[in-house]
Amino acid sequence: MFANLLTRSSAIGLALSAAIALAGCATTTKRVPMTLEQVIQQSKAGTPPADIINQLKDSRSVFEVSGSQFAKLREEGVDDSVLDFIQRTYVASVEMDTRLRYQSMYWGYGWGYPYRPYYGGWPYWYGW
């Protein structure tokens, strides 16, 4: 009887957790990234820079902007704090991409499994 109760409660718990997981997936919304044109339009419309920055954060927008494009954005009326945020997010995304690319180069983060390859008795980066 105890084994039957345990099996039944396990099945109920599994069904409940699956229902919660599926309900969580159904309520997620897709984030639509902002464009530079939207940033310019909002700046011209008089939207406060803090609101534009919050929208950029919420949409997780990252822009690769050249120096001349920064100058054009400034001429279009985009605030300096928004331009600084655009630059910081791009630099942070490049740093994160670099970390993710090189931390898993040899079997994961850190030394990896079992060890990173050695060159002449020293780790490979001392080989030159």
Image (cartoon, helix red, strand yellow):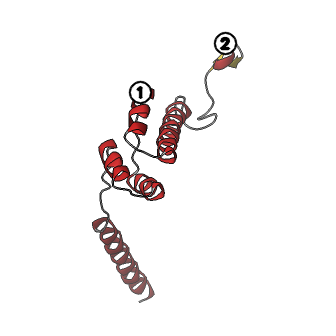
- Residue at 52% over, 29% down: 105
Tell which residue pokes out farthest to the bottom in this image. 1
Q: Is residue 5 above or below residue 124?
A: below
Residue picked out by circle 2: 127
Q: Quadrant of the C terminus?
A: top right
Q: Tell me where residue 68 appears, x and y as whole percent.
A: 41, 27
> Which secondary structure, mark 1?
helix
Answer with left or right where residue 120 lies relative to residue 86: right
Q: Quadrant of the N terminus?
A: bottom left
Q: Tell me where residue 22 appears, x and y as whole percent.
A: 30, 68
Q: Amino acid at mark 1?
A: Ser
- Residue at 38% over, 50% down: 43
Residue 34 seen from this side: no
- Residue at 38% over, 33% down: 72
Residue picked out by circle 1: 68
Tell which residue pokes out farthest to the top in this image. 128
Q: Amino acid at mark 2?
A: Gly
Q: Is residue 112 above or below residue 49?
A: above
Q: Tell me where residue 122 appears, x and y as whole percent.
A: 71, 18
